[in-house]
Amino acid sequence: MKKKKFSISKMIVNILLIIGIVAVSFPFVWMILSSVKSTADFYSFSFWPKSLDLSGYKYVFEKTDFTRWYFNSFIVAIVVTISNIIFCSLIGYTLAKFRFTGAKLIFLIILSTMMIPTEMLIIPWYVFSSDFQWVDTYWGLIFPGLMEAFGIFLMRQFMLSVPEDILDAARIDGMGEFKIWLRIAMPQVKPAISALAIITFLGNWNAYLWPVIVTNTAAMRTLPVGIAMYGTSDAGGIQWNTIMAMSSLTVIPMIIVFLIFQRQIVEGIALSGTKG
Amino acid sequence: MKRKETTAKRTFSLQTKKALIAYSFLLIPVLFYLAIRIIPAFQAFLMSFTTSSSSAFTMDNYHKLINDEVFWKSVKNTILYVIIIVPLQMLFGLILALAIERMGGKLKWFYRIVFFLPYMTSIVAISWVWRLLYDPNSGILNEILVKLHLPTQEWLGSPSTALISISVVIIWQMMGFCMLLFTAGLQVIPRQYYEAADIDGASKWQTFWHITFPMLNPTIVFLAIIGVIQTLQTFTQIANLTGGSSGGGLGGPLNSTMSVVVYMYNEGFRQYNLHYAAASTVFLFILILIVTLIQFRTFNKSYKL
């Protein structure tokens, strides 16, 4: 009797989860369906595309700088990610493993900057970007993200747990301090590095506010800015099939990458969330 | 005696050497950090007390800010976003984590992956997909309402429903993140606690309130802080769901979805009133500071109990 009741409750949970799955995945399905509809299908509502219409995709590749936006997003995200891995772990390592005057102060200052909203920094960034003519350049897109307080904090936490003995052993062997950080300490905190890499890449790949401010020409846009600009300022109203084609081309590769590296990504984000 | 002195000297020199190495590691990164994070923060403060025409100290920007109805509307909306979004995304995240925890093996992972998917995907691209779902003419939501013989809605087009419609998108995207962190939180609860509760004959409800919930407290605190801070800075979803010709402008209709950051963007980068916009970001900074301090205090207390 008790067992039966349990299985009924389990069934209810299952049904609810399946409803949840539908709610979560429906927008994705709808995005793909809409990307192959003709304009007429949008005027007279139809659930399935009446015929396979690829004009949205054709427009994306022939009439817009979409591939360039893809490239820009990739460059920005990759450079920022590499920079964060190097600098955050170097700063984190030094703050965790060296005792020197000012160590606490530096850490405290970096930590306190986590409370400053990016929005507050954006205006001064924009002012000196225009002074130095960084507007509409890759450097302009990249420089604010090169070091993040959160990354430094995360790396410091993990570097603290690196055993002192192995560092000393390397010192006795005559290894230089820089090499000790790179060859001995870094491999010890691999999970933290991959977590940092994942969240930094994702954050920059999706970033919108700063890129939309610092770019002017269509060629310098990142992917989110390109989609948003096409959607909002294009004359003649919203072309749904083209926007959905852009969205699909943005989202589907992300889903594929996510499915390939699902375990690392899920664990990385959980790790950065729980330790941070 | 002499020997002691030399070892003291040697350790001293070793310490200075290590300190020098530390400084050499930190010099360039810390200077750069200073230049892009710390100096701009002070600059934003300074800018908010000056105008573009004169660098003399003035409270004009703040006077204007305090007397602007649209600004207060944006503050009110931002607080509404927080009140609607943060509890709901955490609640759904918790329910999902608990429900999935009861599933077996492979299925567990499958559910987790699917519910986490929205968090992984581009906010801008997804906002446009939702904008299509909400579209009064081409959207499927109204089509469903018609089929069910219910009155159609304006969704993003009406001041009474637009803010909630945007909140739904954000909750939809963020609940997977909450689920993931709750799952991680659930996994570190020692099993013995549940076994003991089982022996004592505790009901499921009692077990949840007396073991699971208190043990999840650190996760709840973390998600609450992160959630509130993120929601106070909401911009991308609002910009993409309401911006442009058909939506009646950024933060529209009738400023009903305008957040503080959208207000800042409009003033700073549409009107190019950078000094005035800086004042609104200082306000945002103070808001975030207050919220963080309050949350740390109240939650830390309940955690100790």
Image (cartoon, rainbow, N blue to C red):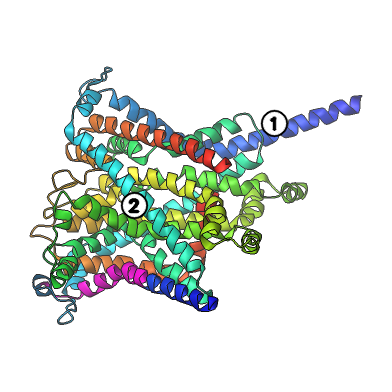
A55 vs A61, nearest the viewer: A55
Question: At 15% across and 82% down in the image, what residue appears?
Answer: A51
Look at the numbered disc 2 and give the secondary structure of its residue.
loop
Q: Residue furthest front?
A: A1
Q: Which residues are magenta?
A: A19-39
Left/right placement of residue A45 relative to residue A72 reads: left
A255 is within the stretch colored magenta: no
Q: Chain of mark 1?
A: B
A85 vs A270, nearest the viewer: A270
Left/right placement of residue B215 relative to residue B17 reads: left
Q: Quadrant of residue B130?
A: bottom left
Residue that badge 1 annotates: B16
Q: Residue furthest right?
A: B1
Three-letter amino acid code of the residue under disc 2: Ala
Question: At 49% across and 56% down in the image, what residue appears?
Answer: B181
- Residue A207's disc is 2
Look at the numbered disc 1 and give the secondary structure of its residue.
helix
Question: At 17% across and 33% down in the image, what residue appears?
Answer: B69
In this view, A17 is above or below A220: below
- Residue B188's disc is none
Q: How far is disc 1 from disc 2 in space, using C-alphas?
A: 42 Å
Q: Quadrant of residue B73?
A: top left
Q: Chain of mark 2?
A: A
Residue B50, position as x, y percentages in the image: 26, 23
A72 vs B190, nearest the viewer: B190
The quarter in which the C terminus of chain B is drawn is: top right
A37 is within the stretch colored magenta: yes
